[in-house]
Image (tube, rainbow, N blue to C red):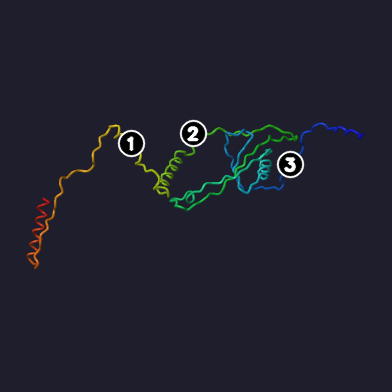
Amino acid sequence: MPNPPKPLLLGPLRPNVFKPPRGRKPIYLPNFTLTLLRTPFLPPSFASFITPLSLNKLDLKDYLYHAYNVPVLSIRSYIQQQRVLQDKPGARVPRARRWYRARSVKKMTVEMGRKEDGKGGIGGGEFVWPEEEEDLEPWDKRAWDAAQAAQKAENETFGPDAPTLPKGDRKTMAEQAKALLEGNIIWRPSWRDYGRAREVEVDVEMNEGGGQGGTAALSRRGNASTAQSS
């Protein structure tokens, strides 16, 4: 009879001491730009960035660790394709059927760990966005809104889709039609009746020989016209 298998003895559980390798090439002047997005719908331990298309997850992980001493637990990335526009954005007079698609935007969402203390353990620390400014007058918000409204009105007037957009007098015509149906105003024609039409000139037959007879006929015709007009 074969011997029964011996039980496997397990040692005490130890914390995971594995540390993933990090980049060691010193870069003093990074040639890329990261844009931190305001994400109130995410927990404080998450941060979202707009990154260059050439930046990968390991690059962002090393950057956050070496620049801010923030370990990264996980990263999710996706590329957002931009919609097709007619002509390039910012064109003064957009040209019709000049299709343009802007460069895609790459976004990364990072789950940040806590800052490492000097003993190799894990310390505290989370990132919380400051409160949004309510008074934007120091940044000339009123002038910015006016410029945006003027740009929108110009695009609607001179854009390629201008003939298909509703005009400004459509609202006025709707208000007048509503007031007419409710009986608030009485419709009257805008034209005036000047009476029955009458002939101004009288045809006069001219002599075949012309000369004074023709001149007299023309004179009579002109006198008749003058009399009719008066």
Residue in the image at 89% along x and 33% along y: 4
Residue under the point 46% across and 50% down: 91
Say which residue label 2 marks.
Answer: 135
Rendering coords of residue 160 (x, y %) = 42, 50
Q: Position of residue 14 (x, y in %)?
A: 79, 33
How far is mark 2 from mark 1, CA to CA?
37 Å
Q: Residue furthest bottom?
A: 209
Rendered position, 59 above or below 128: below
**Label 2 packing within 10 angstroms: few (<14), some (14-19), many (20+):** few
Which is nearer the N-term, disc 2 or disc 1?
2
Q: Which quarter of the figure is the N terminus placed in?
A: top right
Tell me the SS state at disc 2: loop
Which residue occupies 76% across, 39% down? 18
Q: Nearer the viewer, mark 1 or mark 3?
A: 1
Q: What residue is pinned by disc 3? A: 20
What's under tag 3, amino acid-wise?
Pro
**Picture disc at residue 175:** 1
Q: Earlier in the sequence, mark 1 or mark 3?
A: 3
Give 180 or 138, whichever is nearer the viewer: 180
Nearer the camera: disc 2 or disc 1:
1
Q: Secondary structure at mark 3?
A: loop
